Image (cartoon, grey):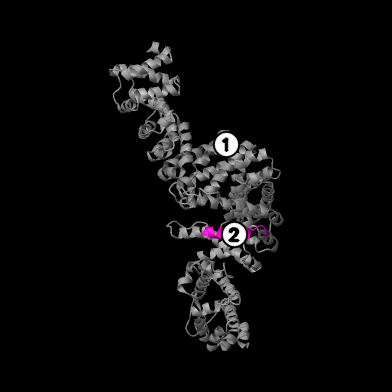
Amino acid sequence: MASCAGEGRPTLRRCLAVLREASSDSEQLAALLLVTKAVRAGEVDARTRRQIFDAIGFTLPSRLLASREPPEGCPEHTFQALGLTLLACFCTDPQLAGHSQILNKIPTFNDVLLAPCSPDTSSMVDDVYQCLAAVLATRKGPKELVSKGTVSALCQAYVRRGAGSERALRLLEGLLAAAEARCWQKDAPHLLAVLGQLSDDFLNAGDVSKFELCEVLPRFIPLSPPLAQDPQGSECLHKLYKGLASILGSKLDQSQRDPALKLAACLVQACGSDWIPAGRAGSKFLALLVNLACVEVRLVLEEPDPVDVEGKKEVITACYVLIEMGIQECLNEEKPLLEEVQKMQLLRIMEEAFGAVIFYLRQVRQEELHDPFIFASVRILGAWMAEETSSLKQEICELLPFLVHYAKKLFEEGEAAASLPQPDGTPAGLGSSEGSRLPQDALRFLLPGFCHLTAEDKPRDILICEGAPALLCEYFLQQWQLLLRELSSPTPLTSTEMSLQTLCGICLNLVVTAPDLISLPDLCWRRGIPVFNPLTSINSLFLSVLQGTCPAKEFFRAAIRFLAEAHDVPGRGQAVAVAPAYEGAWPDVRELWLLGMQALAGCVPLVPWLPRAVLEARWLQGLAAALARGASLDPELLAAFQGVLAELAGACKTCKEVILSHQGREWANLYGMAVLEQRLSEQ
């Protein structure tokens, strides 16, 4: 054996020949020992490794792993160690690493990690880590490792801090990167134990390892379920807060500050501000976090150098997360973490940071539009525009052409991607969750800001000039189709419903302030009509100026039912009350109902057939009869009903006669409906 070892690869090839032709176990074992010695010494290349596999296959390593009786005078785990060495050798070939014979050995690998470690088994542990790393790199590997218990084994190996524990941690990072949700779903207690160990180390470290842990910890912070819901998770969060407070309260250089900010942003994404304790210390820490994030944004974006920005995109994106938390906390009135003085200070600081974001976005070139960092910058600006309507108005108006162009580009690319068939033949958008395979949706984050801006003359004119109304129409149709699919699905509604509600607010602003838009040929109002059916009452203002088509009539009939059925017709002297079917949702739809009544009153003189639709619904007759019986009305309802009744009486002779036949002049005078009384008196 010693002679063979010194002769190098020719001898190795002879030993492989012996191994293939061995007639006894002793001959095979002798050749195998030399082969494994060469493997451990790193004396084999890829071709030779393949020759070893061709000579041995999986059968022999499997027999060795199953053997429990070592040769006389040999250590207890001799055969298992030989088998693992051979498998580690095979796993260096990616094709073999994903072979079912290797995947079937995963439970055996786990057992080796969980067994007590000794000098005799240390090489076995090394081989196991090599095998697991190779399996992880294969396509099916992560799923197989999770399902076969490797996450639990690696967690225990790390917490035990035995041989190779740092390799266990690296493998856990790789598994979480590849299958985070699956890992937490199956092995949350073990992963929390690892997070607890890391949190202890982070809090107690007094050297550079504290900053190294800032890079490791984010991988072990789950987005769902929230850590704060678990006692062990809450303890980890408290330690991480204390560790970050000690870091960020000190003088740091950039290489130390950046990972700390990224860790803080990761905690915010996972838990919001729940990981920051209430009280003076917590409020100072939160204000410091947001302040540091704003300073970092300004330093990088105010005078952007392409090289500097490229290297800082990750940390600036983390800063955006912290700034968005700052926006929310400045708006928080229930159990606020910040004092009023702190809120005012942070708003001024954030305004300066958003000035830098706007300046940066104005420098973006066409070829950069697909950069995820541009999307992150637009998203955070949308969060600011949604809440802060008076700040940086001039700068935002100047940026609006870019925002509309950017949102339109992403929307059109998303529509094109959604129409492409998947391998199973279905459209791409239908099979994906939350459109994860499609280009990102910038409009969703810009809608609230656009809603504010369309109520003001200058920004509205810019949006109209840049073609935003047509884009919003197309987006509405897309979101409507998404909502219909969600309504038929058992999963909870997503942000689609909120987007549709915001779109309706924008459309109301445009219809009221720029009614000429409706007649423009490039808008898709008419094409969009067929999507509205009797379920569309929540959008009862959207197409209020359409007329003449069957879908439009169906829409208005649905709107009339929504408005008419909201209140019960009371008996003599009783108050008009919200109908039982509406009571649960009335706080949410009350304002919509009042706006709907106002919109209906405005439509009556414009849509010739609308009064007849009201009569066919028997709403006018019932309402007039109730008022004739002296039904009690609060001032808000009184104004709403008078608006509709007056327009019906002025536009339709039949409606006027119905009202008069129910003593309309008397109760109009009694209720103080002066406008209606005048209309009834006109010839």
Please identify the quarter of the rendering in which residue 310 is found. Answer: top right
Residue 218, image x, y percentages: 52, 41
Near-viewer residue (420 or 683)? 420
Q: CA distance from mark 1 to mark 2?
A: 46 Å
- SS state under label 1: helix
Left or right of 393 in this view: 431: left
Residue occupied by mark 2: 472
Q: Residue furthest top?
A: 3
Give above or below for 8 relative to 416: above
Amino acid tagged 1: Phe
Position of the N terminus by quadrant: top left
The kind of secondary structure the magenta stretch mainly shows is: helix
Residue 67, image x, y percentages: 30, 26
- Number of marks drawn: 2
- Near mark 1 (Cα within 10 A), the count class, few <14, some 14-19 or many ≥20, is many
Residue 338 visible, this orientation: no
- SS state under label 2: helix
Q: Which mark is residue 211?
A: 1
User: Nearer the observer, disc 1 or disc 2?
Assistant: 2
Q: Which residues are magenta?
A: 465-479
- Near mark 2 (Cα within 10 A), the count class, few <14, some 14-19 or many ≥20, is many
Sequence-first disc among 1 and 2: 1
Asked whether residue 475 is drawn in magenta, I would say: yes
